[in-house]
């Protein structure tokens, strides 16, 4: 691999607005396509060896896209569940036509392998930050599924660790690499909507569950390592529903009352549209329908709650655009988009500005985002959703979630990342960490 070089947070903040304002065009997609073609011509000696930490449905989706890059070779998978390890090996070996993929129960053994350059972290939320930081300290670059940390403190520590170790980090907020979302942000940055005044992000209706499922007999460690599954989370008795994916919504395992399930994407896109990658809203005020956030420049961010599935029951501004819809409004017009790949632009006179919005790609597609990560592993440049971008957008999400949990208006100081005159909120910036080792 090339000599590590990574832009500092100061350099990033000085240049992020310029980088973020680059419009998406057909030529840009053609350039991305040429990068993929170049990667496919890379010799075996120059391949990036990838390890996987935690393989479930979402990881399978990510990994399937990554397996298509001929300059990437997945060489090892770690998971605490035997059934998932075996399914992952079948996926990888099937793609490569061999039986070379090595399996581990404990991901620390995977990190000890000197031949692994990068890892995909796709565990449950409770593990994302801890596993990513251990990987960075082991000299690995990391693509982490979101939410990247289940507390503000996790996100701060994660960002600091990657800056200190000079490892490459990509948050799995892949919608920044999807053409219709890029086009909507480009319209905002180019001034085509006029002066921005309101941004709309969508999230599931927040939930907070502190109950425990009934205890069941703990399986053999080889079948499911319950201690490692829990990881940094508080101890509780084993129940098979947790390991089958029913952990979401439980406070011990989840982040921000589920607000970051979508908010890690939609709030992040609004941050980008407002050129606020170096900051976050100052105030967060909850209501029954949404959380109203206000930036220093006066722009409002409305985090609207959607029933699941939302159907026709969402906020009035939403057109049927698939999951994770966002809307940017200025004094000259608005643009709205979602995972369907469509754009809704108003007034009609602005439609011409969106006519070159390239081919339609669904918002779940991680191909371009993964390609950006691997290209940055080679170049040692910051990724599209690097640790600095993740830090501010995730902290904004967590601050909004805490305002909902505490049911009161919160004010944060972006410089210190502490809540102003609110000791209770500041105590919730971190959670106790269980000694799982």
Image (cartoon, rainbow, N blue to C red):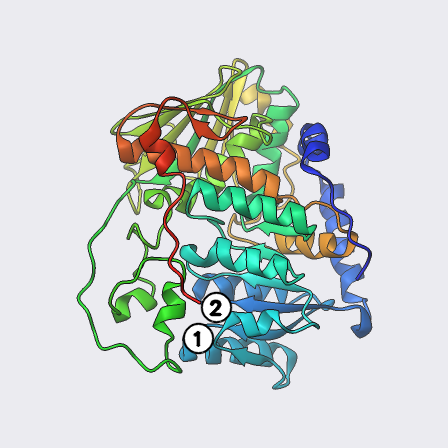
- Mark 1, Cα crowd under 10 Å, few <14 / some 14-19 / many 20+, is some
Q: Tell me if residue 343 can be seen.
A: no
Which residue extends farthest left?
214
Residue 192 horizontal/vertical position (percent): 62, 20
Asked if the residue at tag 2 contacts the one at tag 1, i.e. Cβ–Cβ closer than 8 Å, the answer is: yes
Q: Position of residue 87 (x, y in %)?
A: 47, 78
* Mark 2, secondary structure of its residue: loop
Mark found first going from the N terminus, 1 or 2: 2
Residue sitting nearer the eye, 348 or 126: 126
Compare residues 289 and 391 and report the one nearer the observer.
391
Quarter location, residue 226: bottom left
Question: x, y (%) of residue 103?
Answer: 54, 79
Tell me: residue 145, above or below residue 382.
below
Location of residue 220 with respect to 30 vertically, above or below: below
Q: Which residue is mark 1?
A: 84
Tell me the element at label 1. Answer: helix
In this view, 20 is above or below 285:
below
Q: Is residue 79 left or right of residue 406?
A: right
Q: Quadrant of the N terminus?
A: bottom right
The residue that appears at 81% across and 73% down in the rendered structure is 45
- Provide the residue designation for mark 2: 55
Q: In the figure, 312 relative to 34: above or below?
A: above
| Residue depicted at 68% across the width and 53% down the height | 167
Picture coordinates of residue 18, whole percent (x, y): 72, 29
Q: Quadrant of residue 17?
A: top right
Residue drawn at x 55%, y 42% is 390
């Amino acid at each position: 691999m090339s000599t590590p070089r990574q832009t500092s947070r100061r350099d990033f903040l000085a240049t992020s607005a310029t980088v973020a304002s680059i419009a998406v065009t057909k030529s840009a997609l053609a350039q991305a396509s040429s990068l993929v073609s170049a990667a496919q011509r890379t010799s075996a000696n120059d391949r990036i060896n990838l390890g996987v930490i935690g393989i479930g449905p979402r990881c399978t989706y990510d990994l399937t896209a990554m397996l298509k890059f001929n300059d990437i070779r997945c060489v090892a998978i770690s998971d605490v569940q035997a059934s998932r390890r075996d399914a992952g090996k079948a996926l990888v070996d099937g793609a490569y036509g061999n039986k070379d993929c090595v399996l581990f129960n404990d991901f620390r053994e995977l990190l000890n392998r000197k031949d692994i350059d990068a890892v995909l972290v796709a565990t449950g939320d409770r593990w994302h930050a801890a596993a990513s930081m251990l990987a960075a300290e082991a000299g690995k670059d990391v693509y982490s599924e979101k939410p990247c940390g289940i507390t503000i403190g996790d996100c701060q520590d994660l960002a600091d660790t990657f800056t200190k170790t000079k490892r490459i980090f990509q948050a799995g907020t892949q919608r920044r690499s999807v053409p219709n979302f890029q086009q909507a942000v480009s319209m905002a940055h180019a001034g085509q909507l006029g002066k921005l005044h309101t941004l709309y992000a969508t999230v599931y209706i927040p939930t907070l569950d502190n109950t425990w499922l009934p205890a069941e007999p703990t399986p053999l460690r080889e079948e499911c390592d319950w201690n490692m599954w829990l990881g940094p989370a508080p101890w509780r008795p084993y129940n098979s529903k947790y390991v089958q994916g029913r952990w979401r919504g439980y406070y011990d395992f989840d982040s921000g009352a589920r607000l970051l399930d979508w908010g890690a994407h939609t709030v992040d896109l609004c941050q980008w549209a407002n050129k606020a990658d170096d900051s976050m809203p100052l105030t967060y005020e909850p209501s029954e329908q949404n959380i109203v956030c206000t930036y220093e420049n006066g722009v409002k961010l409305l985090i609207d709650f959607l029933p699941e599935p939302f159907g026709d029951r969402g906020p009035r501004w939403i057109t049927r655009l698939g999951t994770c819809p966002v809307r940017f409004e200025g004094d000259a017009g608005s643009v709205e988009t979602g995972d369907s790949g469509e754009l809704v632009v108003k007034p009609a006179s602005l439609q011409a500005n969106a006519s070159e919005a390239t081919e339609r790609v669904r918002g779940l597609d991680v191909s371009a985002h993964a390609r950006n990560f691997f290209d940055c592993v080679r170049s040692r440049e910051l990724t599209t959703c690097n640790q600095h971008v993740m830090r501010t957008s995730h902290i904004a999400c967590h601050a909004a979630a805490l305002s909902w949990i505490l049911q009161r208006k919160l004010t944060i100081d972006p410089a210190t990342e502490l809540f102003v005159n609110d000791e209770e909120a500041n105590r919730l910036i971190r959670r106790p960490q269980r000694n799982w080792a």
